[in-house]
Amino acid sequence: MVWSRRLRIALIAAVAGSAACGVKERVRSFFQGDRPRAVVRVGAAEYSQADLNRFFDSRLRDFREPAQADRVKSQLLESFIEEKLLLGEADRHRVEPKPEVVRSMLEKIEVPDGDRPKTEGSIRRDGELERSIADSVKMQQYLRDYVLKDIAVGQEECEEYYLKHLGEYIRNDTVRVREILVDDAALAGRIVASLRANRSKNFAELARVYSKAPSAPNGGDMGRFQRGELPEEFERAIYAVAPGGVTPIVPTRYGFHIFLVEEKILAHQQKLYEVQHEIAEKLALERERKRIDAEIEGLVNRIPVQIHRERLGFRYVGSRFGGSP
């Protein structure tokens, strides 16, 4: 599923950021003999300020706008509760994370040496990190197997969407070009003269020998560009010649550029077969988001949630969940 793939990438980054702070807080609480007070209750489960802080830290690492802190933290608090609701359903359905998926996600995480727990010398042996990843995988599996399992987009639906949004599928002028970039104007002139006189037809080989551009090892192949993606002085020269033609020399502060126009496709309405996969992905993603929103809304209405506002350490400005008086 499209949604699940994107969620997996986001969760890897979020989980990795939460690894360091958990160890210090657990050690401090142990020696101080503190029993953490619940700041959030979701069903029968209670979560402390340390639980919430770990969640925040993994997502607020680069947060630098104190004026928006209450709003941002309130949104993250709601995300925290939503995740716990989904995890509760995963447990109720006895979903177990696949070990190979957990291992794969662990291998993708890089934690700075300074943040690595000192236990057993490896971040992968930190139980907090592994539990967080296992929870992430469990939530994904639950969504995929129970919430999103029957989502499909058919041919007729793609065609209907395509016909209603034709204007979104107009392909701009497109060219495929090769480039030779040299420092010497006289050399550039000799290369152009040789190409136009057909004394040397192999533009790619000349690019490999003479060009200093990054594309030189690939025979000067720059790829395809739509109109507007290249500098204006390049486009003036490139679009003025026919496919197979060589442009005049284009001087810039980087040197002297020569372009071969290998292919030119004028702006046109894309056919359905060209964009059907893109449309199917778009429609599937929209349906997944709606299905997940509906699932969370149902859980919110069924499972009691309590927020102890006075213990949060910030002002909860959301309206989705109530708090204790």
Image (spheres, rainbow, N blue to C red):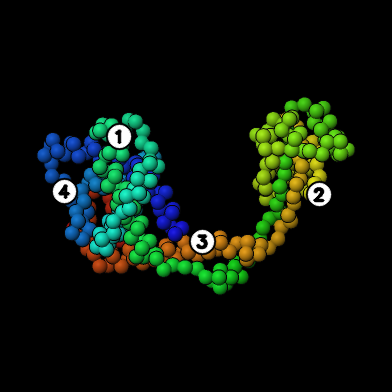
Percent across and percent down for residue 41 are 20, 56
Q: Residue at x 18, y 36 (%)?
A: 28
Q: Which residue is mark 1?
A: 122
Q: Residue at x 21, y 51 (%)?
A: 47
- Local crowd size for mark 4, using a 10 Å CA cut-off: few (<14), some (14–19), many (≥20): few
C-alpha span from label 3 to label 2: 36 Å
Q: Is residue 120 above or below residue 236?
A: above
**Which amino acid lies under the numbered mark 2 shown in the image of this protein?**
Ala
Q: As rendered, which of 10 and 66 lies closer to the eye?
A: 10
Q: Is residue 113 above or below residue 75?
A: above
Asked which secondary structure carries label 3, the reply is helix
CA distance for labels 3 and 1 = 39 Å
How far is mark 1 from mark 4, CA to CA? 31 Å
110 vs 226, left or right, is left
Which of marks 2 and 3 precedes in the sequence? 2
Which of disc 1 and disc 3 is earlier in sequence? 1
Whichever of labels 3 and 4 marks the residue nearer the N terminus, that label is 4
Q: CA distance from mark 1 to mark 2?
A: 60 Å
Q: Are marks 1 and 4 in contact (CB under 8 Å)?
A: no
- Residue at the left extreme? 33
Please indicate whether residue 311 sits to the left or right of residue 250 in the image: left
Residue 127 visible within the image: yes
Q: Which three-letter amino acid code belongs to the residue tagged 4?
A: Arg
| Quadrant into which the N terminus falls | bottom left
Disc number placed over residue 37 in the picture, else none: 4
In the rendered structure, which amino acid carries the disc numbered 1? Answer: Ser
Tell me, for residue 281, which label it has, or none. Answer: 3
Residue shown at 28% from the left, 56% from the top:
96
Question: Is residue 78 visible to us here?
Answer: no
